Image (tube, rainbow, N blue to C red):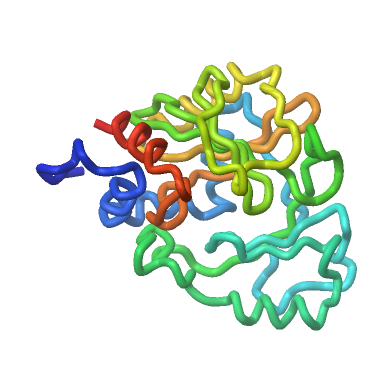
C-alpha cells in the first residue's frame, strides 16, 4: 500500500478508509464467510471452525426442516445479513429476506472486497458462548493485527464493545458504549493472540474475529474494513489516535 505524506498523522479509522481502497479479489476469498472457513483451518489447524449444517443451493432453497433454534442462517457474501432462527422462525418472512439479500453487498462501493463475492447462504450451528451460554447472541472477540502482530482486542456484544490492550488492560471508553456485563480476561488469551497472529500474517492489516466456547476458540471471520472505514470508537478520539499510531 502506497501511503500519503500525512499517513503518520491520520487516525485509525482514516487509515482503514484508505486501506479499503486497495483491497481486491484476493481479499474476497478471505471475506467470503464460507471459503474463509477452509482457509482459516488450513492456515491455523488448531482453531475450531463452527459447523456448517447445510449450504443452500440458492436463496429459494430454505426448507421448513432447516428452521432450528440451535442454528443460524448466514449470508456468505455480506455483513450482518443473518437470520437467527431462535428469534425469527417464520419461513415466509425469512424467504422474503433471502430474496432481498440475494444481491451483491451494498457496502461494496467502499468495501471493495465484497464486490467479487457471489451471493450464497448457509446454515451454521451456534457456538455455546463462554459467558452467556446458548442464547444465540454470542460475544465476539476481535483482534486487530498490523503486519501479523496483534495491537488491540475489542469484545463486542450487540452494539456495545469494550477495548483492551493485548495484555488485557482496558482502554477508556464512553460508558454508554461499554458492555453492561463483566467480561473477564480469557484464560486462553495467549492462544487467541497466537491464532490471530498466524491467520493475520499475510496482511498489512486485518481484524481477526473469534467466538469463545467454555473450552475452545472458534474462528469467526476475517474483517479488513471495520465499520466500513467509519469511526470505530465513537467519542474516543484518543483511542483512534493511539491505534492509528501503531500502524506505521
Q: Where 95 falls versus 42 (above or below)?
A: below
Q: Position of residue 19 (x, y in %)?
A: 29, 49
Q: Position of residue 8 (x, y in %)?
A: 19, 36
x 71%, y 82%: residue: 96
Is residue 30 visible to the viewer in this orientation of the structure?
no
Q: Position of residue 44 (x, y in %)?
A: 55, 28
Residue toward you, 39 or 242: 242
Q: How many marks?
A: 0
For the N terminus, the image quarter is top left
x 59%, y 37%: residue: 162
Q: Position of residue 99 (x, y in %)?
A: 64, 81
Q: Looking at the rendering, which quadrant does residue 116 occupy?
A: bottom left
User: From the viewer's perspective, is 181 left or right of 1?
Assistant: right
User: From the viewer's perspective, is 241 left or right of 74?
Assistant: left
x 58%, y 16%: residue: 190
Q: Residue furthest left?
A: 5
x 82%, y 69%: residue: 88
For the C terminus, the image quarter is top left
Residue toward you, 27 or 205: 205
Q: Where 144 falls versus 222 (above or below)?
A: above
User: From the viewer's perspective, is 149 left or right of 22?
Assistant: right
Q: Where 151 falls versus 33 (above or below)?
A: above
Q: Looking at the rendering, which quadrant does residue 21 occupy?
A: bottom left
Is residue 52 visible to the viewer in this orientation of the structure?
yes
Q: Looking at the rendering, which quadrant does residue 45 occupy?
A: top right
Amino acid at each position: 500500500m502506497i501511503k500519503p505524506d500525512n499517513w503518520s498523522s491520520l487516525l485509525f479509522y482514516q487509515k482503514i478508509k484508505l486501506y479499503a481502497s486497495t483491497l481486491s479479489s484476493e481479499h474476497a476469498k478471505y471475506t467470503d464467510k464460507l471459503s474463509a472457513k477452509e482457509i482459516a483451518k488450513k492456515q491455523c489447524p488448531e482453531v475450531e471452525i463452527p459447523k456448517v449444517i447445510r449450504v443452500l443451493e440458492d436463496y429459494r432453497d430454505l426448507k421448513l426442516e432447516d428452521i432450528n433454534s440451535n442454528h443460524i442462517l448466514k449470508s456468505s457474501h455480506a455483513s450482518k445479513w443473518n437470520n437467527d432462527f431462535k428469534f425469527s422462525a417464520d419461513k415466509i418472512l425469512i424467504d422474503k429476506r433471502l430474496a432481498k439479500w440475494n444481491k451483491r453487498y451494498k457496502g461494496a462501493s467502499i468495501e471493495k472486497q465484497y464486490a467479487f463475492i457471489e451471493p450464497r447462504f448457509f446454515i451454521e450451528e451456534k457456538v455455546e458462548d463462554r459467558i452467556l451460554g446458548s442464547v444465540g447472541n454470542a460475544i465476539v472477540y476481535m483482534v486487530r493485527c498490523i503486519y501479523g502482530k496483534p495491537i488491540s482486542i475489542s469484545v463486542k456484544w450487540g452494539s456495545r464493545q469494550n477495548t483492551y490492550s493485548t495484555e488485557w488492560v482496558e482502554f477508556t471508553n464512553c460508558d454508554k458504549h461499554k458492555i453492561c456485563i463483566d467480561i473477564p480476561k480469557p484464560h486462553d488469551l495467549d492462544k487467541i493472540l497466537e491464532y490471530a497472529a498466524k491467520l493475520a500474517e499475510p496482511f498489512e492489516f486485518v481484524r481477526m474475529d473469534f467466538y469463545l466456547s467454555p473450552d475452545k476458540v472458534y474462528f469467526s471471520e476475517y474483517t479488513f474494513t471495520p465499520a466500513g472505514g467509519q469511526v470505530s470508537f465513537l467519542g474516543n478520539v484518543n483511542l483512534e489516535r493511539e491505534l492509528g499510531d501503531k500502524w506505521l
